[in-house]
Image: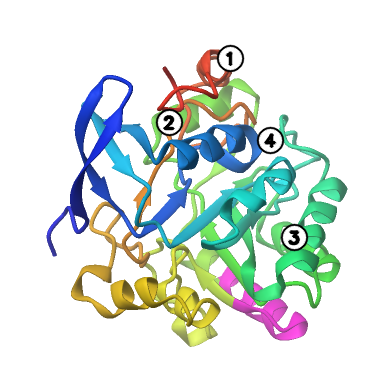
Amino acid sequence: MNRTPWNRTIVETSTGPREAVEPVILSASRSTDIPAFYAPWLVGRFRAGYLRWVNPFNNTSQYISLAAVRAIVFWSKHPLPLLGHLEAFADIGWYLSQTLNDYEPEGLEPGVPPLGSRLAAFETFVRLVGSARVIWRADPLLLLDGLGVNGLLERVRAVAKRVRGMTERLVFSFADIREYRKVARNLAACGCAWREWDRVSMEGAAAGLAAIGREFGLEVSSCAEAIDLSRFGIAHGRCVDGGLLRRLFPGDERLMTFLDSPRSGKDPGQRPACGCTVSKDIGRYNTCPHGCVYCYANTSVVAATRNARRHDPAADSILP
């Protein structure tokens, strides 16, 4: 597939006309919590008709026209701030992927609300749009001294009990600490002794997650994991899922036309094991002040907090 599957157009910006890509599906976002911190900015960008995204690898800007957007996948640990802005997306199909982890005893998510508040937010969105449009993420599953596979499964099951009947899907991933030196450094700085997942521990966790799925009526899938867990009934997931969008919004002709086209295959900009349908992610690294110790997207909490303070809701990009 062409690495730029989107049509191109011209947008009128504050600095004059610019060439822009024109995506049909937005991801908001893998790299920062837009619902928690940047919802007013996103609403403003839809009113303006475009935004500017900065490539994290070469720091170049890409303009994105929002005129053709027909679907948004929101990713969040704290989606409640988005609630008051949903009217701006009334004509666009969207669903929410909300992370519900319980690392409160370890203090690994210091900036997120208490688990009880996050569960209440989850229920609020389910009541608003239904169980098919709110997905539970247990992400990442992290092994620590004092928190092994059985302990993790006990916590996941406790959350599953709280969201029983509220969602159809549970998506999980195994933490890849060795691949991210900054994460290993941040965990060491907080005194957290971590262990890497191996095949035995992954399969043990998969068996337990599958059992939780059966008990609570959840379809369980993995996120960007190369390991084949199909013998446990666990498929490779698609967090940006064209099939789900097709089921949720069959009356949107423009979205269906895109999903029927060859351009709507696997996202070439993601990891090889990622099954996501192609979308345009509009987030920016080092801008999420949740402070999660295991975060892949932040170099440090200090950098992310400093950048979040620089945010201007009226700017064309998350950071000016």
Q: Amino acid at mark 2?
A: Tyr
Closer to the chain start, of discs 2 and 1, is 2
Q: How many marks?
A: 4
Image coords of residue 69 (percent x, y):
39, 56
> In this view of the protein, which residue sits in the foreground, 116 or 144?
116
Q: Mark 4 and mark 3 in contact (Cβ < 8 Å)?
A: no
Label 2 secondary element: loop
234 lies left or right of 254 = right
Q: Amino acid at mark 1?
A: Arg
Image coords of residue 23 (percent x, y):
31, 54
Instruction: Name the residue beneath numbered marker 1.
Output: 309
Closer to the chain start, of discs 1 and 4, is 4
Label 1 secondary element: helix
What residue sits 79% from the left and 38% below the top? 113
Closer to the chain start, of discs 3 and 4, is 4
Q: Residues within 10 Å of mark 2 (few under 14, many from 20)?
A: many
Q: Mark 2 and mark 3 in contact (Cβ < 8 Å)?
A: no
Instruction: Name the residue beneath numbered marker 2.
Output: 285
Q: Which residues are magenta?
A: 204-219
What residue sits 48% from the left and 82% below the top? 250
